[in-house]
Image (cartoon, grey):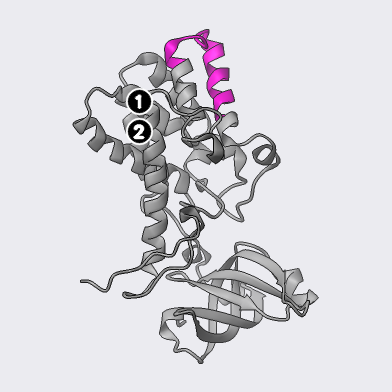
């Protein structure tokens, strides 16, 4: 079956796609419509369902695959899909549903091998023990969860891939700044977003859990570190207190949700690597679907700035 890229503007469209980021809105004339994104297995396109009725609303579920009919148009220099008909994909359609979901560039097994490999490089037995224990306990969630609902690495295994990317980036920094404590840096990077395995519901139809909304991933992670450390009788050790500080401070500034600002060198590095990887991963995705010489959509992670894709080979 044809993909979005195979259709011309103004052409009638029939294809299978996963629909996500669905929101029901109202026009100035109080007519309801759905604003959403559609992923056809290769590309993501913005979509609209105008004048949506109760029948369509009843079958419209986030992160499910549909057979859709509609028309492709150009809107602000980018394709937009206007959906007129849709139904859930079924077994009778004889399609591989997994091709319509986004996955990390590395498999779960590859990510496990890489991240446990970094854990084994941690020389400090206390930091290594706590990090290994927590990742082992929660590995089923850690290696499948996304890192976010919308903002960045919001796909299957996105959380682990985000951690893997930060670890790779940290190696370059350690080469330039060998005064940094490698063990603290590795442990802090690996555990900084562990709380998202509680904050987010899972890789499909991702939404915030009750504990995610009420407590948040930073506090949830610190609680887990303290719990394991208390069982070991080391909750007051310098290693544990500093590790908890790295998690508490990784958002960098109080106004961005950090209970503490970093006052440890490794905390500064983790904050900037977290920010750098989140932003570059977002730009990579957005620029990949933006034509040369055009601007991306306004990106929330960059305070709604649009980025230019230079027409340079």
Rendered view: 266 above or below 271: above
Residue located at (47% from left, 52% from top): 152
Say whether residue 3 is visible. Answer: no
Residue 269's disc is: 2
Quadrant of the frame with the C terminus: bottom left
Residue located at (47% from left, 82% from top): 1
Q: Quadrant of residue 169?
A: top left
**CB of mark 1 within 8 Å of CB of mark 2?**
yes
Q: Quadrant of residue 58?
A: bottom right
Mark 1 residue element: helix
Rendered view: 102 above or below 46: above
Residue 118 in picture, x, y percent from top left: 32, 31
Say whether residue 35 is visible. Answer: yes
Residue located at (44% from left, 25% from top): 131
Q: Main secondary structure of the magenta part?
A: helix
In the rendered image, residue 229 lying in the magenta stretch gets the answer yes
The residue that mark 1 highlights is: 265
Query: Is 60 situated left or right of 168 in this image?
Result: right
Rendered view: 39 above or below 281: below
Mark 2 residue element: helix
Query: Is 208 situated left or right of 175 in this image?
Result: right
Q: Which residues are magenta?
A: 221-240
Q: Residues within 10 Å of mark 2 (few under 14, many from 20)?
A: many
Residue 5 in picture, x, y percent from top left: 42, 80
Instruction: Please name whichever residue, 295 or 24, is drawn nearer the observer in this view of the structure.
Output: 295
């Amino acid at each position: 079956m044809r993909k979005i890229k195979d259709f011309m503007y103004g052409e009638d469209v029939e294809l299978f796609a996963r629909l996500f980021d669905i929101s029901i809105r109202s026009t100035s004339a109080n007519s309801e419509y759905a604003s959403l994104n559609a992923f056809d297995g290769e590309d993501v396109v913005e979509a609209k369902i105008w004048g949506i009725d109760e029948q369509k609303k009843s079958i419209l579920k986030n992160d499910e695959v549909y057979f859709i009919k509609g028309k492709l148009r150009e809107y602000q220099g980018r394709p937009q899909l206007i959906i007129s008909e849709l139904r859930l994909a079924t077994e009778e359609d004889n399609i591989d549903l997994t091709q319509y979901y986004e996955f990390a560039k590395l498999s779960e097994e590859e990510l496990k091998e890489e991240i446990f490999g970094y854990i084994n490089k941690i020389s400090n037995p206390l930091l290594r023990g706590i990090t290994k224990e927590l990742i082992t306990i929660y590995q089923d969630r850690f290696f499948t969860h996304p890192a976010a609902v919308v903002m960045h690495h919001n796909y299957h295994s996105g959380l682990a891939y985000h951690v893997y990317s930060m670890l790779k980036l940290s190696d370059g920094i350690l080469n330039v700044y060998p005064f940094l404590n490698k063990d603290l840096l590795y442990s802090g990077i690996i555990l900084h977003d562990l709380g998202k395995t509680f904050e987010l519901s899972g890789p499909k139809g991702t939404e915030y859990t009750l504990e995610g909304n009420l407590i948040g991933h930073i506090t949830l992670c610190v609680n887990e570190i303290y719990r394991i450390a208390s069982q070991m009788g080391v909750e007051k050790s310098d290693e544990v207190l500093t590790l908890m500080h790295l998690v508490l401070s990784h958002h960098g500034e109080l106004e961005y949700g950090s209970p503490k600002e970093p006052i440890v060198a490794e905390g500064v590095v983790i904050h900037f690597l977290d920010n750098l990887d989140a932003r570059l991963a977002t730009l990579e995705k957005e620029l990949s679907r933006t034509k040369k010489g055009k601007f991306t959509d306004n990106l929330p992670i960059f305070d709604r700035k649009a980025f230019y894709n230079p027409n340079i080979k």
